[in-house]
Image (cartoon, rainbow, N blue to C red):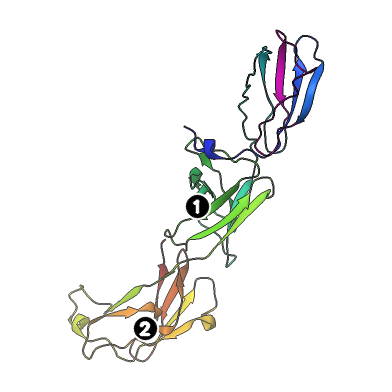
């Protein structure tokens, strides 16, 4: 059965009963809180005649109709109704205002039924990207119903979600926060592996590194003074030890400052999601 079969209809659905052949209106009104109503026993329906029960379309419902022949005994006529569907534009944006990469996964599910109705991955790289959903599980966005747009944790992003009601929100925008990461920098003698006699010389202990985001000026970087073991020819350095917050999908420059003992050097670091 369809997951939406459990959704309640809006109360007091408006309907009409018309004589089929003449189109004359026999009765009109609302179906009440439970969408079940008894018609007057006299002067409305004539036995043996064919009538049309029609539910009127509304913001929440599609119109529907069925025929029935009036009988001389009590009878019940049942009309199946479908919820109206709506259209919502979905988009993602980074809280820091920087461009988003392509390929960010997202899902939309019905808030009450917890059924995923559409999902996908973004296809563009920009500061704000649209979500082009692929409907699954016989999914639909029904008017007046609450849904959740969500990006799961991972891929460089913190779990983020926002609820919305179809028909009330034309645009739903989700602001994403990047996950923080860590990175290790390997320091080694520039002659390592060359066979040169100096490849066994220990690294100077008084080294100075500057860590900055790519595109920023060097003075905006953070100072990193690695603590190296005595006599080490190779050392591992925690890049975040200097207080730099490393964010996923960002590029950083790690620059070794020149001194009397070492030449300047730099390497670029990219934190993948």
* Magenta region includes residue 53: yes
- Residue linked to disc 2: 263
What span is colored magenta in the figure? 30-57
One can see residue 221 in this view:
yes
Q: Which one is nearer the viewer's eye here, 38 or 1?
A: 38
- Residue linked to disc 1: 102
One can see residue 123 in this view:
no
Q: Which one is nearer the viewer's eye here, 111 or 211?
A: 111
Q: Position of residue 176 (x, y in %)?
A: 54, 62
Q: CA distance from mark 1 to mark 2?
A: 38 Å
Q: Position of residue 151 (x, y in %)?
A: 49, 55
For residue 258, above or below residue 108:
below
Q: Which one is nearer the viewer's eye here, 252 or 100?
A: 100
In the image, taking residue 190 as reference, residue 129 lies left or right, namely: right
Instruction: Rate crowding at label 1 as few (under 14), some (14 to 19) or many (20 or more) other CA atoms within 10 Å.
Output: few
Q: Which one is nearer the viewer's eye here, 8 or 248?
A: 8
**Residue at 19% over, 78% down:** 196
Element type at mark 2: loop
For residue 37, above or below residue 213:
above
**Residue at 28% over, 77% down:** 190
Instruction: Rate crowding at label 2 as few (under 14), some (14 to 19) or many (20 or more) other CA atoms within 10 Å.
Output: few
Quarter of the image with the C terminus in it: bottom left
Q: Taken as a whole, is the magenta stretch helix, strand or loop?
A: loop
Tell me the quarter of the picture where residue 268 sits.
bottom left
Q: Position of residue 23 (x, y in %)?
A: 80, 14
Q: Position of residue 160 (x, y in %)?
A: 51, 60
């Amino acid at each position: 059965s369809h997951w939406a079969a459990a959704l309640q209809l809006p109360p007091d659905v408006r309907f009409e009963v018309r004589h089929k052949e003449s189109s004359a209106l026999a009765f009109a009104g609302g179906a009440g809180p439970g969408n079940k109503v008894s018609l007057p026993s006299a002067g409305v329906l004539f036995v043996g005649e064919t009538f049309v029960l029609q539910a009127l379309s509304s913001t929440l419902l599609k119109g529907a109709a069925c025929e029935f022949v009036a009988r001389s005994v009590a009878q019940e006529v049942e009309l199946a109704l479908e919820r109206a569907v709506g259209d919502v534009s979905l988009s993602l944006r980074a809280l820091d205002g920087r461009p988003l990469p392509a390929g960010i996964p997202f899902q939309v599910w019905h808030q009450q039924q917890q059924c995923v109705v559409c999902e996908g991955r973004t296809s563009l790289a920009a500061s704000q990207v649209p979500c082009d959903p692929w409907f699954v599980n016989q999914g639909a966005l029904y008017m007046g119903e609450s849904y959740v747009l969500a990006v799961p944790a991972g891929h460089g992003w913190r779990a983020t979600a926002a609820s919305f009601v179809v028909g009330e929100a034309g645009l739903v925008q989700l602001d994403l926060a990047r996950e923080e990461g860590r990175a290790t920098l390997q320091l080694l003698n520039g002659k390592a592996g060359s066979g040169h006699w100096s490849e066994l010389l220990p690294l100077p202990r008084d080294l100075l590194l500057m860590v900055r985001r790519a595109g920023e000026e060097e003075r905006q970087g953070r100072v990193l003074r690695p603590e190296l073991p005595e006599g080490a020819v190779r050392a591992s350095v925690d890049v975040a030890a200097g207080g730099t917050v490393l964010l996923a999908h960002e590029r950083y420059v790690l620059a070794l400052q020149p001194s009397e003992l070492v030449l300047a050097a730099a390497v670029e670091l990219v934190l993948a999601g």
